[in-house]
Every structure is written in C-alpha cells, then in structure tokens.
Amino acid sequence: MSDVLREKYEHRFRQLDVDGDGFVSQDDVRGRARQLADALGVPAHDPLTRAAEDAADVYWKGVVSHTPDGGARRVDLPAFVAALEAAREDGTLRSMVKPTVRAHLAVADQDGDGVVDAGEFAAAQQALGIPEDRALAAFTALDVDGDGRLTLAEWENAVWDFYTGTDPDGLGARVLGHA
C-alpha cells in the first residue's frame, strides 16, 4: 500500500472514531451518519436518516468482514487500515462505500432535486467538521463540469479517489479531507 493511501485510511479512521476512544465501532460509523442528518435538520425517524444509518452498516460490515476474526465489535487503527486495503485489493471496497455516498448526497440535498449545490455541500461538510472555505473550494474542484451542482457521479468519483487514488491533493482529499 502506498504511503498516501495509508495516510488517507488513517485520516478516515480518525474521522470515524466519533467518541475518540482509539477504536472504530458500528456505533461510531452510524454516529457519523446521524451527525450529518442532525446538523442538517433531518429527524432521526426520517427515511433519509435511516438510509444513511443503513449505508453506514454496509460500510461497517465490509470493514469487519476484512478483519482477522471477521466479527469484531470494534477495530483499532492498524486493523481498520488493513481492512480497507484488503477490501481495495479484493474489489469489495466500492460496494462498501457506494451506499454511503448515495445516502450522504440524499441527506445533503436539502431541496430534493437530486443534486447538491454549493450551499448544500458546504452545509454538509461543515456538519462533519470541515470549515466553510475548504468546503467551498472542494465544491469547485468536485464540480468537474462547472454547472454549479454536484451529481451523484461527481461525488462518487471523488470519494472513490479518496479510497484508491495516490495523489494526496486529488479530488478525494477534498471531499473527505486531507490526511
């Protein structure tokens, strides 16, 4: 694994360790989804929040399926990094990540038009701790066709770049943060 990917996976671990205990658990991963929904005013019982939590569960199950015991209740940093690398190598990473991207876009899409504008993107990113100026710069970079809206495909491509790209300044670093 490249140093860049290792740094990105470590960064993702730190983002997901919501309670800061040095482990990532299913509660942490689901908590991150709820954090986004809560900050954007989407109620816990809303289908969008439930879909985001379900997508978080898919991601979590993918992570733990790539750990040595396959059923861990929580994983430390080395196990998390190794699990993502194993999923990347065996081709299952995309199926772990794609549902979370769809759910994140749906929650961020406050007007329900199927795309995310700069304001919606900035609000979603700020909800997850990314400053507005960085969020708006990221939006500009991710909006590859320059139409002022992020489609699911544009967002998926950026997230996929985060998990697989070796450019530390690539699109993925802009949507999920720099390592």
Image (cartoon, helix red, strand yellow):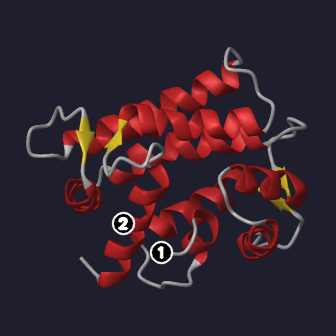
Residue behind mark 1: 179
- Check disc 1: other Cα within 10 Å, few if <14, some if 14-19, many if 20+: some
Which quarter of the picture shows residue 34?
Answer: top right
Pointer 2 or 1: first along the chain: 2
Q: Residue 10 — which label?
A: 2
Q: Secondary structure at mark 2?
A: helix
Amino acid found under the numbered disc labelled 1: Ala
Amino acid found under the numbered disc labelled 2: Glu
Up-down: is 159 above or below 95? below
Task: Give the residue displayed 41% in from the left and 52% down from the top.
Answer: 94
Say if mark 2 contacts mark 1, CB within 8 Å: yes
- Check disc 2: other Cα within 10 Å, few if <14, some if 14-19, many if 20+: some
Which quarter of the picture shows residue 11?
Answer: bottom left
Up-down: is 165 above or below 76? below
> Image check: 130 left or right of 148?
left
Task: Give the residue displayed 63% in from the left and 72% down from the top.
Answer: 174
Task: Give the residue displayed 42% in from the left and 49% down from the top.
Answer: 20
- Counting labels gives 2
Q: Secondary structure at mark 1?
A: loop
Up-down: is 57 above or below 76? above
> Image check: 115 left or right of 86?
right
Task: Give the residue displayed 49% in from the left and 56% down from the top.
Answer: 15
